Image: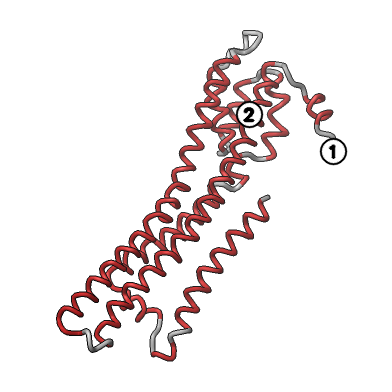
Amino acid sequence: MKYSQKFLLSLFFIGMMTNLLQANDGSIENNLNLWSLIQQGGWAMYPLGLCSLLLFFLAFHSYRETHPRKFQNESESKTLPPILAQRNLPQVSSILSSSHTVLGSALLEALSRAKPALPDANREKIEESLMESLEKEENTIGQWINYLNVIATVAPMIGLLGTVSGMIGAFQTISSGGMGRPELLAGDIGEALITTATGLVIGIPAMIAYFIFRNRLGNRMIEISQAATRFVDYLVGDLTESETDESNPS
């Protein structure tokens, strides 16, 4: 699954850059370059340029925030089960405090409510705190991904606003006597078309990135929830290392 996600990410970034380069190359005969296209697009190209920079930043940051090592590391899976089975919570807290993972942070906060003296170690409160912590972590990471959806929505709208601005300018030119001189309308029409195309070139990849990272985060949180539940089972005594090995044969 992770390889297909990387392929899709690479595909839409390559496609976006190809479209920009083709727009640049196709205008060489008219002595146009990318900068002149930006100038022809008018004021709307500046907020659209900001949206494109935010798109690259948010996509890169979302990729880092949804990377597997952000959520869990192998040392936790190997080290914690026997220590949890012994209910050695100080040692568990020491390991989790240095892990800097989503699972580590959630477990560290949840296990603060554990009571080793009780038979079930206060399981209900532990699981309640665990779900709250995982939800908090998901919202913290998800807010960056949601900004991609904002870019996907706002960029085409800015492009449309630039189109309206260009068409208003074209009608003003016509009203001032430019109907018989098409060259006077070229700038306004160019502004209208360029801003629309630029808004779509930014908005479509942003929408694709949003759904990719949204699904990626959802899958990661499901995996972490299952792993956290197993660790609680070790603490309570409902699960042992031998049972885990039997259910997951190598």
Residue 209 location (% of width, % of height): 52, 55
Instruction: Find numbered disc 2 in the image and state the secondary structure of the residue it sits on.
Output: helix
Between 29 and 50, the one nearer to me in the picture = 29
Distance, label 1 to label 2, CA atoms, is: 21 Å
Quadrant for residue 97, please give it. top right
Q: Residue at x 74, y 21 (%)?
A: 239
Q: Which colour scheme appears in the figure?
A: secondary structure
* The quarter of the displayed image where residue 185 is located: bottom left
Q: Are marks 1 and 2 in contact (CB under 8 Å)?
A: no
Residue 176, percent from left and from top:
14, 81
Could you tell me the amino acid type at mark 1? Ser
Residue placed farthest to the left in the image? 176
Q: Position of residue 50 (x, y in %)?
A: 36, 63
On screen, residue 229 versus residue 17, left or right, reads right
Q: Horizontally, is 88 left or right of 61 in the view?
A: right
Q: Identify the element where label 1 is drawn.
A: loop
Extreme front residue here?
180
* Residue 29 in the figure: left or right of residue 170: right
According to the image, label 1 marks what residue? Answer: 250
Residue at image location 61% in from the left, 31% down from the top: 225
Q: Which mark is residue 228?
A: 2
Which label belongs to residue 135?
none
Amino acid at the residue labelled 2: Ala
Q: Between residues 17 and 69, which one lies in front from this camera angle?
A: 17
**In the figure, 51 relative to 137: above or below?**
below
Q: How many marks?
A: 2
